[in-house]
Image (cartoon, grey):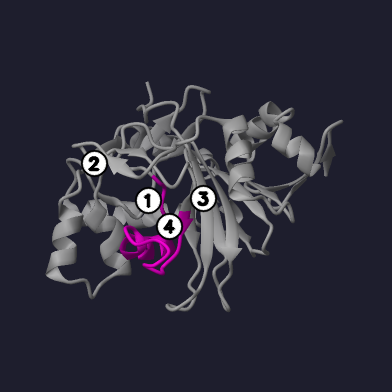
Amino acid sequence: MSVTTAFETIDLTPHIGSEVRIERDQLLSGEHAAAIRALLVQRGALVVRGVHLSDEELRTVSRTLGNLRIGGQKRASDGKVLSEGDGGVLKVSLDPEVNPDYARFLPGNFLWHMDGTYEEVPPFATLFMPFRLSREGGDTMFASTYAAFEDLPPAEQKRLEGLRAVHTMQAALFPAMRQCTPEEFAVWSSYPQRSHPLVWQHKSGRKSLVLSTSAAWIEGMHPAESHNLLQDLMRHATQEKYTYRHQWHVGDLAIWDNTGAMHRAMPYEANSVREFHRCTLNGEEPISAAA
């Protein structure tokens, strides 16, 4: 446990995840936002237990940590998300009455992914709170793509730094929806593809793997070789030592660094009332290849 004059932190695993113990009014005031943000980038995912924020309070905390993405969900002609949610809060649910436009895309959340791989500048972070929980399952897992890269042998790091992967909506959703209709597949195919370096050279100087189920193939590589490499990297990055699994209680707040971690929802019942409210912080730097 580490203690500051403001709050306590407890590392939940060696590589990712810390619990933050902070007074509710201090969290809302933003007086320690810089320290929380620095901890978020260092640890990949943070948990504040039993804080019970309203949607407006969730927006308030989000704004202390970055630039909140607000407004109705809209996309530019290249598919880039311009804004999200009702006043910055998006309801995440498989129930089309709760989330009529995006419930059909949410099965992809059961697979390891990074948000915004279709954008040049992916979102920086997500703040996530449960409104209703599933009867069974529904935990959320996080995996550190910083630690996964840093533990690779230097020669393998160097090889990966020269590669790029193409991300597609088909790759993100088809593994979770094998019985999709031709019409659904056509909708996914209408989304833009995006090529990203396989290794992100962050402005901070650190490097992370750019991994997600949306990664469809490695540019310039034989399809079989590409498939095997992406599968091997995903298995490497999601080893137990790089992951944290959060078991939810109503009132919890989780914050994760989308630029240095993947996440996924664990399975739960198809007719679940599970509903989470999410705020997204806009990205602050493009995915840049290592120099």
Is residue 111 highlighted in magenta?
yes
Instruction: Give the vertical position of 174 relative to 242 (above or below).
Output: below
Write down the residue under mark 2.
Answer: 79
Question: Quick check: marks 4 and 2 in contact, CB under 8 Å?
Answer: no
- Give the side of residue 176 with respect to residue 152, left or right: left
Which of disc 2 and disc 4 is earlier in sequence? 2
Element carrying mark 3: strand
Write down the region rendered in magenta. Answer: 91-115
Question: Quick check: marks 1 and 4 in contact, CB under 8 Å?
Answer: yes
Q: Amino acid at mark 2?
A: Gly
Which of disc 3 and disc 2 is earlier in sequence? 2
Instruction: Return the x and y of residue 58 as percentages of the image width and height.
Output: 61, 44
For the C terminus, which image quadrant? top left
Closest to the observer: 87 or 246? 87
For the point 65% across and 30% down, the residue is: 38
Is residue 279 highlighted in magenta?
no
Q: Amino acid at mark 1?
A: Ser
Element carrying mark 4: loop
Q: Visible in this render: residue 243?
A: no
Real-space CA distance between mark 4 and mark 2, rounded to the nearest whole angstrom: 21 Å
For the point 31% across and 37% down, the residue is: 119
* Image quarter of residue 286: top left
For the N terminus, which image quadrant? top right
CA neighbours of label 4 inside 10 A, class few (<14), some (14 to 19), many (20+): many
Closest to the observer: 221 or 180? 180
Write down the residue under mark 4.
Answer: 112
Closest to the observer: 115 or 291? 115
Residue 232, label in figure: none
